Amino acid sequence: MNIDHSTVLVTGANRGLGAAFCRALQERGASKIYAAARRPEQVDTPGVIPVQLDITSPADVEAAVERCGDVTLLINNAGIGTGTGVFADDALDQLQREFDTNVFGPLAMSRSFAPTLATNGGGAIVNVLSVLSWFASSQSALYCAAKSASWSLTNSLRLDLLAQRTQVVAVHVGYMDTDMTAALDVPKSSPDGVAALVLDAVETGESEVLADDVSRRVKAALSGDLSLLYPMITS
């Protein structure tokens, strides 16, 4: 699909990658950008339309569908990372939080906006996932589980929405220079660079974006021995 003259809803649009999407969409000529956030007063990108949206709230999702009935591109960017391992005392509570925002929220948005996209010609859905869709980390085990589940559901959405000609794009990326990784001293991708890659993929009809070297390496290793990803494991 063409970004030029499109109408786009971006979740989690108040900072980081969400704000970068808004800037990139403007540069490519999007006609209207709904910038959704739990606290829309924090959206500070000029020229966008702030929208109150907690993707874990069915009432908020329903209201967004009513308000944004002209959407042709949905970007499911909102997410959280609790940094919780499987043996943490609050693991089950944090797992619920991770799945509510990173799995059930994007799925609810995709299901709710699918009829709108169909009415408006098909359009596209972008789901922002992670390299951790494919790789387990003890420190972020629950985030990894949630992103892995969301990856699987993204693939199912792609199959189910073929008939209405809705493109579904999965985005895999490692560390980005955002608030979520501010305390980590590691190489990070630019949110603006990732947003540009994703919009390129939307315009060329691709189904998957591997936005950095680490995502490409991890995906390539999935077909090999488990020790390629987890060298601490020996046969």
Image: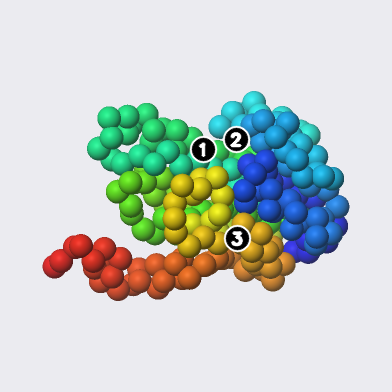
Q: Residues within 10 Å of mark 2 (few under 14, many from 20)?
A: many
Q: Residues within 10 Å of mark 1 (few under 14, many from 20)?
A: many
Task: Identify which residue is drawn at 30% across, 48% down.
Answer: 138
Q: Amino acid at mark 1?
A: Thr
- Circle 1 or circle 3, nearest the eye: 3
From the viewer's perspective, is 182 left or right of 84?
Answer: right
Q: Is residue 61 above or below residue 214?
A: above
Which x, y percent locates residue 101?
A: 51, 38
Q: Which residue is mark 2?
A: 55
Q: In terms of secondary structure, where does tag 3 sit?
A: loop
- Circle 3 or circle 2, nearest the eye: 3
Using the numbered discs, state the Cα–Cα distance from disc 2 to disc 1 in whole angstroms.
7 Å
Q: In terms of secondary structure, where does tag 1 sit?
A: helix
Q: Amino acid at mark 3?
A: Ser
From the viewer's perspective, is 219 left or right of 178?
Answer: left
- Mark 2 or 1, nearer chain start: 2
Q: Which residue is mark 3?
A: 190
Q: Is residue 61 above or below residue 15?
A: above
Which x, y percent locates residue 8?
A: 75, 49
Q: Residues within 10 Å of mark 3 (few under 14, many from 20)?
A: some
- Mark 1 or 3, nearer chain start: 1
Q: Which residue is mark 1?
A: 101
Task: Identify which residue is drawn at 54% across, 56% down.
Answer: 176
CB atoms of marks 2 and 1 within 8 Å: yes
Q: Amino acid at mark 2?
A: Ile
Q: Quadrant of residue 211?
A: bottom right
From this viewpoint, is residue 174 visible?
A: no
- Mark 3 or 2, nearer chain start: 2
Q: Quadrant of residue 177?
A: bottom right
- Which quarter of the image is occupied by the N terminus? bottom right
Using the numbered discs, state the Cα–Cα distance from disc 3 to disc 2 in whole angstroms.
25 Å
